[in-house]
Image (cartoon, rainbow, N blue to C red):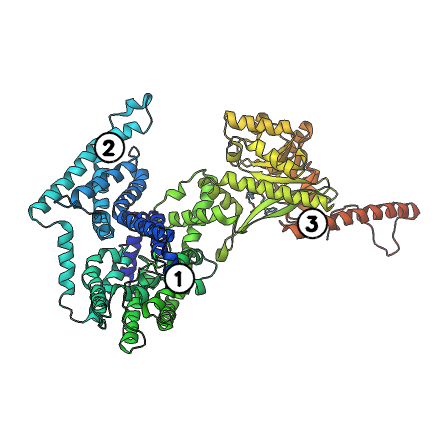
């Protein structure tokens, strides 16, 4: 679709990036709890209970729920003005208006809304705040916030001096006074102009809508036009049903009342297109027949965020609350869904009309609440199973219409996300080098992708997507002396994300401490299990930590707690701190390092020799081990300076009784040379890649049995040498224990 119409795709892309629309979406999302509470109240208030139960206390409770539902929906416009304004101001806070508390423009927008739409006669009767005013409330929220923020950003705050002895937000609030008064003034003038013309905003808008529908004579045509406009509005992020409420009232609710009046006089009602008819047979799950969309996503888009949201959205959709599906998925501004989103309700309107015209279902006689659940609604509307069957049939048709679009959207989204994802990985790779890249604040596809990834990272552990692998570290004889725990994140269809990128992202998203704690706990739990099985006796578990963790108060206590929970001594683990990241020079970090050292927890400097701080760190902390960086060990065979540096470091380590491990050991010659230069322990693909726990346990076991058999061979060889130097099979026995590795 987007290939065929590049201009259209560009427009959609621009709209997606629009701060106003994202504020509208957020504003609605923030209202979800309110809408859900209102919907649940209405459901409970309208439950069709047996007569015996309704009399008595339950009757009173139903009344309470009904009132609560009405009250909640009566607040929709007021709350929406605030949530949209707040969302817009919060987005702008990072760009321009640092001082302005987002709550200030939200309050101002609320006042502007009241100034603009409050009835002249002062008789609001509660309708002032109801869903009818959703559209004006969106306009007011955006307009008032824009005026306010522009005024606030254009003036330098003169109140900074107050901050010395007041709450830090106080100067910002004082700074908001002028923009607040001015913005409200603008809306007051607008109201006066509207008042003088004696055409309040809503009346104007309603008249425009009615003029559009008036020429249509047939109920079917009206219903189709109503659905078409409503869906288009939803698609651009506007609550279609609420905006078209005047039309709904004028035609479909009037038709419902007409049916009731005819019924009361003993006649046969004839109006097909009533509000309940559309709610029950067409808007199943809410606008766009969202229930059908959710089911299609549930069937076709497995293992995705969309699928998870669809599952969450199914429950409210069964009660026809669609906001979660429409704003959360998101459907709005998603060109892939435009066609089915509009076509499905139109198709179902026609099918339901013919079902009624052919006599399969009767005209809906009574008014049913829009929250009446799927299936039950059909039964109650038709007073027979025919109604429920029609609902299921319509759902089936809806799923059929949505399915190809959902599949296409899945492919398209995946392709786009793959592209953005690669860009994100490149950007994050860079940010691994520059601490804090601000990638999460970026307002481009990479930023959106980064925020989505960060959000997924938040739940990745609980979803079982993050695991640890273990890479063995061996001594000169080839026995396993240590294991390094390395994090692995399998990110659905995108595959594995490199751990240094995961760590950089976790740092940016403030998740590093939570993730780090999980790594330590998981690695200790694994070591405990191996020790209990007799696999890893005496083996030290190396765990990578980030400098941010050291700078978090209570880190050392938490490590000690984890160790005691797994009944491990402090010396069972070694914390690796990479030299490529700066360790903060402050009180908290110093205390943490001291406490760790005092408790007997080993510390190692990872990637030693990569940065400039190696020797400085050796002076600042008690170091138990260093791990030579790959840049030194990889070039050791070809670069005499690397050899010199390694020899010097090894000498220093021997003097200071520090364990030295050479990383990235990939071939035998490299290992022999590193050993000759003074390295005593090795880690690298020559011995093993990082392994999943079960394979790692096998590796440790096999190494141990090799060591035992070598020891035996060593005894036999000594005996044979005594007897003549050669084994019976004519082979010379290798003096190097590692060259005979599996
Ligand atoms: P690192 O701690 O220096 O880990 C060694 C990295 O080198 C690992 O990459 C390992 O798979 C790789 N490696 C080991 N031997 C060889 C070899 O012979 N050849 C080659 N080409 N590579 C080898 P990995 O697992 O991708 O980890 C990258 C970095 O991510 C780690 O470097 C560490 O800084 C960070 N990291 C991994 N897990 C964690 C974690 O749980 N917490 C923190 N803070 N950082 C972690
Ligand atoms: Mg490491
Ligand atoms: Mg390293």
- Viewer-nearest residue: 282 or 398: 282
Q: Which residue is mark 2?
A: 176
* Real-space Cα separation, disc 1 to disc 3, in angstroms: 45 Å
Comparing labels 2 and 1, the label whose residue is closer to the camera: 1
Q: Residue at x 86, y 47 (%)?
A: 717
Closer to viewer: mark 2 or mark 3? 2
Query: Residue 413 falls in which quadrant of the image?
Result: bottom left
Disc 2 from disc 3: Cα separation:
64 Å
Residue labelled with disc 1: 294
**Where on the image, by quarter, is ligand 1?**
top right
Q: Which mark is residue 179?
A: none
Q: Tell me the mark number nearer the camera, choosing from 1 and 3.
A: 1
For label 3, the SS is helix
Can you give x and y, in whole percent of width and height, for residue 267 in the image?
21, 72
Q: Position of residue 327 (x, y in %)?
A: 34, 54
Which residue reaches farthest top?
A: 165
Asked if residue 638 shows in the view, the reply is no
Of helix, strand and loop, which one carries label 1? helix
Residue positioned 29% across, 73% down in the render: 362
Residue at figure coordinates x 15%, y 61% from the top left: 210
Q: Residue furthest right?
A: 723
For mark 3, what is the residue? 697
């Amino acid at each position: 679709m987007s290939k065929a119409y590049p201009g259209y795709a560009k427009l959609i892309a621009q709209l997606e990036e629009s701060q106003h629309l994202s504020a509208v979406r957020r504003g609605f999302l923030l209202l979800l709890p309110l809408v859900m509470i209102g919907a649940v109240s209405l459901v409970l208030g309208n439950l069709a209970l047996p007569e015996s139960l309704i009399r008595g206390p339950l009757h009173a409770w139903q009344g309470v729920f009904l009132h609560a539902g009405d009250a909640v929906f009566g607040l929709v416009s007021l709350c929406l003005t605030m949530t949209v304004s707040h969302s817009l101001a919060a987005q702008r806070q990072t760009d321009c208006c640092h001082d302005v508390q987002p709550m200030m423009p939200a309050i101002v927008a609320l006042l502007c809304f009241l100034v603009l739409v409050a009835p002249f006669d002062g008789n609001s009767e509660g309708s002032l705040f109801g869903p009818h005013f959703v559209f004006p409330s969106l306009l007011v929220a955006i307009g008032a916030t824009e005026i306010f923020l522009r005024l606030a950003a254009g003036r330098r705050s003169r109140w900074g001096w107050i901050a010395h002895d007041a709450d830090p937000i106080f100067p910002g609030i004082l700074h908001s006074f002028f923009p607040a008064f001015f913005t409200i003034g603008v809306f007051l003038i607008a109201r006066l102009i509207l008042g003088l013309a004696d055409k309040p905003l809503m009346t104007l808008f309603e008249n425009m809508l009615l003029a559009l529908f008036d020429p249509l004579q047939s109920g079917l045509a009206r219903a189709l036009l109503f659905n078409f406009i409503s869906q288009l509005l939803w698609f651009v992020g506007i609550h279609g049903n609420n905006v078209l409420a005047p039309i709904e009232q004028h035609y479909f609710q009037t038709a419902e009342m007409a049916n009731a009046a005819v019924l009361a006089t003993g006649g046969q009602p004839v109006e097909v297109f009533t509000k309940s008819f559309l709610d029950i047979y067409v808007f199943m799950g809410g606008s766009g027949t969202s229930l059908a969309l959710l089911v299609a996503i549930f069937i076709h888009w497995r293992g995705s965020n969309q699928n998870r949201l669809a599952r969450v959205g199914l429950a409210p959709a069964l009660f026809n609350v669609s906001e979660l599906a429409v704003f959360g998925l998101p459907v709005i501004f998603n060109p892939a869904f435009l066609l089915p989103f509009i076509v499905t309700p139109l198709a179902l309107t026609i099918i339901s009309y013919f079902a009624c015209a052919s006599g399969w279902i009767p005209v809906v006689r009574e008014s049913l609440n829009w929250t009446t659940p799927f299936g039950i609604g059909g039964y109650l509307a038709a007073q027979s199973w025919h109604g429920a069957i029609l609902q299921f049939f319509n759902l089936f048709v809806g799923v059929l219409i949505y399915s190809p679009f959902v599949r296409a959207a899945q492919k398209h989204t995946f392709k786009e996300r793959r592209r953005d994802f690669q860009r994100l990985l490149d950007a994050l790779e860079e940010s691994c080098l520059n601490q804090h890249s601000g990638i999460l604040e970026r307002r481009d596809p990479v930023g959106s992708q980064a925020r989505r990834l960060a959000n997924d990272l938040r739940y990745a552990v609980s979803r079982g997507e993050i695991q640890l692998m273990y890479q063995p570290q061996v001594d000169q004889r080839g026995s396993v002396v240590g294991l390094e725990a390395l994090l692995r994140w399998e990110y659905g269809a995108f595959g594995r994300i490199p751990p240094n990128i995961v760590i950089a992202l976790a740092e940016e998203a403030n998740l590093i401490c939570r993730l780090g704690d999980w790594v330590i706990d998981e690695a200790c739990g694994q070591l405990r299990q191996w020790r209990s099985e007799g696999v890893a006796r005496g083996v030290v578990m190396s765990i990578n930590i980030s400098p941010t963790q050291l700078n978090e108060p209570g880190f050392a206590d938490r490590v000690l707690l984890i160790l005691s929970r797994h009944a491990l001594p402090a010396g069972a683990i070694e914390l690796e701190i990479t030299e490529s990241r700066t360790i903060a020079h402050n009180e908290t970090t110093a205390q943490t390092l001291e406490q760790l050292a005092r408790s007997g927890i080993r510390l190692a400097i990872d990637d030693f020799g990569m940065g400039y701080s190696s020797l400085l760190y050796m002076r600042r902390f008690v170091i138990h081990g260093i791990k030579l960086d790959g840049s030194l060990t990889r070039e050791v065979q070809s670069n005499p300076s690397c050899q010199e540096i390694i020899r010097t470091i090894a000498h220093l380590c021997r003097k200071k009784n520090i364990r030295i491990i050479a990383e990235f050991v990939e071939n035998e010659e490299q290992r022999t040379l590193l050993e000759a230069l003074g390295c005593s322990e090795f880690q690298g693909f020559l011995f093993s890649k990082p392994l999943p726990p079960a394979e790692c346990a096998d590796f440790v076991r096999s190494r141990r049995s090799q060591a035992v058999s070598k020891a035996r061979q060593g005894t036999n060889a000594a005996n044979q040498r005594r007897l003549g130097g050669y084994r019976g099979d004519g082979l010379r026995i290798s003096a190097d224990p590692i060259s005979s590795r599996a």
